[in-house]
Image (cartoon, rainbow, N blue to C red):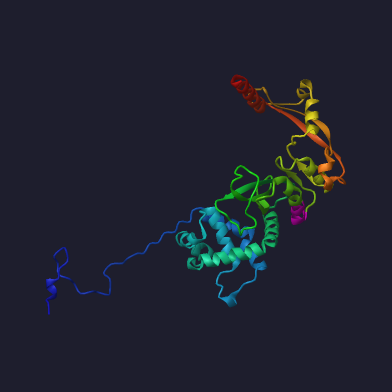
Amino acid sequence: MANKSHYRRQDRSPLRTFNPQPSKMFKFKQEKILGSLYLIKPLLERMNIKSTIDSIIPERKENGQILTTGEVAEILVANRLHHPLPMKDIKLWAEVCGIKELFDVEPHNLNDDRIARGLDDLAQYFEEIETKLSINVIREFNLNPEEILWDTTSIYFEGDYDEAEIVQFGYGDKPDLKQIKLALNVEKDSGIPLRGSVIKGNLNDPSIVVENMKKLRNHLNKQDLLFTGDNAVGTIPNCLLLDKNHIRFIAPSPASSLFEEAIRSVTDEELDGCIFPDKDGTPKFKVTERGVYIHLQDKEKQEELKTVPAFWARCLIVWSKSRAKLDREKREKYMSDH
């Protein structure tokens, strides 16, 4: 049997017998990267996300469910606001960012299978959840939605997606790629979203305007809303349908002879009657208005609108210094090139 003294450490001292009682006290330090989560958590609680969702989506404890869908959704929202990641990385993010300490949720329960099931549940009850959450936000933050800003954007996809009904070729900057469209309604003063929707990629913006606004009024149970949108809102057919449904709106005028005639009728002297000055005292905007009779000019191509009555609309005509400068530069470049 070898002599224990023959075994030496690098410092050449004999090995000592293990002592289960440490001679010194040790401290264990663990850090969590909370960052903005410390501020996000109280906002999510005020919005009542977890309780609202759990009041709609039933628990499935008999199937071994540990986390409710409300808990999963609340943490997913926190992740999108804090550090957006794909499903497979949520568990690791939760481990290093103090999710257990802040939300009382064990990170190992946030696996991608549980998150996927939660997203399926949210999709099934989406409209009911969205309605209740909007009402919660309006009450909690003392909002009084009077004017709504509406717009859409596109998300493009690489690949075939033949089995995805909603992913389609459509209108936009990249006609060679399939897409889906996202529409969002936000309260003007706060910028808080009140209703969103995912739309088939092959639908153009003008075709979804009126239905969106009707749904939002019912969604909020508030009929007297003013909608502000882009060119898609102000097409002649949409103007007629919006007026028929008693929906107030503000939108840029479309390329139509109805508005072109109104613009041509304005004189420089009339524009000089209402000037908004720039910082240097020169006119920044000049404004006047006209009444424009909105009606269909080509009834043969608009059979479904033949019974929709025409109406008078208030049209603001605005001269802009920056727009005038841009137009002048374009003309000068065109003339120099030709």
- Seen as rendered, the residue at the extreme bottom is 1
Q: Which residue shows up at 52% across the image and 54% down it?
A: 84
> In the figure, 149 relative to 281: above or below?
below
* Highlighted magenta segment, given as a residue range: 214-221
- As rendered, which of 292 and 130 lies closer to the eye? 292
> In the figure, 253 relative to 89: above or below?
above
Q: Which residue shows up at 16% across the image and 63% down it?
A: 10
Q: How many marks?
A: 0
Quarter of image, res 131: bottom right
| Image quarter in which the N terminus is found | bottom left
> In the figure, 74 relative to 240: above or below?
below
Asked if residue 206 can be seen in this view, the reply is yes
Q: Is residue 13 left or right of residue 130?
A: left
Q: Is residue 5 left or right of residue 304?
A: left
Asked if residue 98 can be seen in this view, the reply is no
Residue 26, horizontal then vertical, whole percent = 32, 66
Residue 89, horizontal then vertical, whole percent = 48, 60
- As rendered, which of 228 and 123 lies closer to the eye? 123
| Image quarter in which the C terminus is found | top right
The rendered magenta stretch, by its main secondary structure, is classed as helix
Q: Which residue shows up at 77% across the image and 34% down it?
A: 256
Residue 115 highlighted magenta (yes or no): no
Residue 217 highlighted magenta (yes or no): yes
- As rendered, which of 185 and 160 lies closer to the eye? 160
Q: Which residue shows up at 28% across the image and 74% down it?
A: 21
Residue 304, horizontal then vertical, whole percent = 83, 48
Q: Is residue 48 left or right of residue 233?
A: left
Residue 225, horizontal then vertical, whole percent = 77, 48
